């Protein structure tokens, strides 16, 4: 991954392949952002004019590359748009810095070292720039044969090698901590992205579980894997019912981080459908090409647990990965079949494409047995949530208003787009079944909320619970922007990590 370093060297003398400067949208054209003074001096104070002549406006994500004038050690200057300039006495928003650093890092693929001369008023700004650079630099190369590897010197599939953040003293404790946290969090978001981008022929429930076991060994986590035999024996009818049509049998992974001084325990539950064909209720063409991403919830949970371990937070975090492949076959669950869930409830499967809630239900019941202080599940659960909120925003549902608000605020704080959604009780009866305790689907209207209500039935009595439906933002199909690449995004990882930090700090109830 891209190395993040801090430097107090002047932008003029630092050895780097490129210098990144910020340019904001001012009332009368582009304005050079603080941090770039030395670079502007090398341009005789005319950097803003040069940029304007080149057509730059300072708009968000805009990238302008210039040959450096004499007086700068680096050969290239890259001006990145920060969007609207902040008002007097205001600083650039963290997310504006994170996105700008991401856009710059993306434009610097294949480059060894870049210096980031962006505004760094405080440690939060350093963290945002570091995170943005390391996230923007992400590339997925695991499936490349030869493309992009032939010309090692100018390999555009290689991420930016090093991002040196200027203006922040490396010995300053707050700056040092900020950049270390940024590196750990970004590495784990990128771990989630890698898992999501891996095609379903390479990532099965078994190989996913093996990755969890390897990471557990590396980071000192406790891991347990239930295989299909253990799942049958344990009565996990939801996981087995979804996975029984596949040649790749299901797994339930428990991966736990504990801290000696922890006062609270968080349980994180992730939907891990390594491929969602829809099962016998097969998805039509046009709806199944990206369904390798249906394990993004489990990837986020896994990555968040590792991040918490790397940061050594004083909180216990138990991750539950509900892994299965949803395939049609002679052994697959049929529409109309009734499953006996781990909780003892029976569920009539009306649509085998509503499989996420079935695997999550078993994991939620199992997680509840350990009586955690709170449970958060993360899932690419419904197309209805994408219709409601679009492809950049995840929905937050909960059985506790304050907890839902906290999660929404945390997401906003870390730069993830989220929105609170209700769980209207009157929708519950649409899942009544004439033969079983309930059905796995109900009313189509409000489908994302119906799914949330289904999950709620499997959360242990009195346990605070929230549900993040990341079906929209988990997988990005449009052009990259800011620090968001095409493909797996690592949605929800940063929110989960900040939730763990806040819980460790005793900020949540
Ligand atoms: N994995 C899908 C949801 C999804 C849709 C994720 C688009 C990412 C992008 C889920 O398993 C599903 O198929 N849900 C159905 C439920 C319905 C049958 C009740 C849906 O949303 O259509
Ligand atoms: Mn489905
Ligand atoms: Zn699914």
Image (spheres, helix red, strand yellow):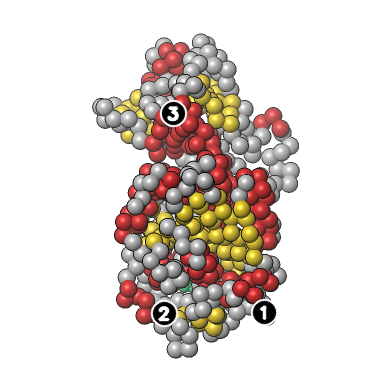
Q: Which mark is residue 174?
A: 3
Please provide percent x and percent y for residue 58.
38, 31
Q: Which numbered disc flags the more N-terminal residue, 3 or 1?
A: 3
Mark 2 lies on residue: 431
Quadrant for residue 99, please give it. top left
Please provide percent x and percent y for residue 220.
62, 46
Q: Which mark is residue 331?
A: 1
**Which residue appears at 70% of the width and 70% of the height?**
247
Question: What is the C-alpha distance between the residues marked 2 and 3?
Answer: 52 Å
Secondary structure beneath dot 1 equals: loop
Q: Which numbered disc flags the more N-terminal residue, 2 or 3?
A: 3
Q: Is residue 415 something one can see in this rendering?
A: no
Question: What is the C-alpha distance between the residues marked 1 and 2?
Answer: 25 Å
Mark 2 closeness class: few <14, some 14–19, many ≥20 residues within 10 Å: many
Secondary structure beneath dot 3 equals: helix
Considering depth in this image, is 346 or 99 the residue closer to the camera?
A: 346
**Which residue appears at 51% of the width and 52% of the height?**
317
Q: Which numbered disc flags the more N-terminal residue, 1 or 2?
A: 1
Mark 1 closeness class: few <14, some 14–19, many ≥20 residues within 10 Å: few
In the displayed image of the protein, which residue is found farthest to the left? 88
């Amino acid at each position: 991954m891209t190395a993040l370093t801090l430097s107090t060297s002047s932008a003029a003398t630092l050895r780097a392949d490129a210098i990144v400067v910020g340019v904001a949208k001012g009332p009368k054209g582009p304005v050079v952002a603080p941090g770039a003074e030395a670079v502007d001096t090398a341009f005789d104070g005319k950097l803003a004019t040069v940029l304007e002549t080149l057509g730059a406006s300072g708009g968000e994500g805009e990238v302008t590359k210039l040959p450096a004038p004499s007086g700068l050690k680096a050969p290239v200057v890259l001006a990145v748009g920060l969007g609207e300039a902040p008002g007097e006495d205001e600083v650039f928003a963290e997310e504006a810095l994170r996105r700008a650093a991401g856009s710059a890092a993306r434009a610097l693929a294949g480059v060894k070292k870049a210096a980031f001369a962006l505004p760094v008023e405080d440690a939060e700004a350093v963290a945002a720039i570091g995170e943005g650079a390391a996230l923007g630099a992400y590339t997925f190369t695991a499936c490349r044969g030869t493309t992009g590897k032939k010309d090692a010197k100018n390999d555009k599939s290689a991420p930016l090698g090093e991002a040196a953040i200027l203006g922040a003293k490396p010995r300053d404790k707050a700056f040092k901590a900020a950049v270390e946290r940024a590196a750990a969090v970004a590495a784990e978001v990128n771990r989630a992205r890698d898992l999501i981008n891996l095609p379903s022929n390479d990532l099965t429930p078994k190989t996913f579980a093996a990755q969890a076991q390897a990471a557990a060994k590396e980071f000192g986590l406790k891991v347990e894997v239930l295989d299909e035999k253990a799942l049958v024996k344990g009565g996990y009818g939801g996981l087995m019912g979804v996975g029984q049509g596949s040649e790749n049998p299901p797994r339930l992974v428990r991966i736990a981080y504990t801290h000696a001084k922890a006062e609270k325990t968080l349980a994180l539950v992730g939907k891990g459908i390594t491929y969602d064909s829809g099962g016998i209720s097969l998805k039509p063409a046009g709806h199944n090409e990206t369904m390798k991403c249906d394990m993004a919830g489990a990837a986020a949970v896994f990555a968040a647990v590792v991040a918490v371990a790397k940061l050594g937070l004083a909180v216990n975090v138990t991750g539950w990965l509900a892994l299965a492949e949803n395939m049609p076959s002679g052994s697959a669950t049929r529409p109309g079949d009734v499953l006996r869930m781990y909780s003892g409830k029976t569920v009539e499967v009306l649509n085998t494409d509503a499989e996420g809630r079935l695997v999550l239900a078993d994991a939620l019941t199992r997680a509840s047995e350990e009586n955690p202080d709170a449970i958060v599940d993360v899932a690419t659960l419904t197309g209805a949530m994408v219709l409601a909120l679009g492809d950049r925003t995840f929905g937050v549902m909960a059985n506790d208003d304050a907890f839902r608000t906290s999660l929404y605020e945390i997401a906003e704080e870390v730069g993830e787009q989220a929105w609170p959604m209700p769980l209207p009780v009157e929708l519950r009866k649409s899942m009544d079944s004439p033969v079983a305790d309930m059905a796995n689907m109900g009313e189509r209207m409000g489908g994302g909320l119906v799914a949330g209500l289904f999950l709620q039935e499997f959360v242990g009595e009195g346990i605070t619970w929230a549900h993040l439906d990341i079906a929209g933002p988990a997988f990005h199909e449009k052009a990259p922007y800011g620090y968001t690449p095409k493909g797996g995004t690592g949605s929800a990882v940063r929110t989960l990590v900040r939730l763990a930090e806040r819980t460790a700090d005793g900020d949540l109830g």
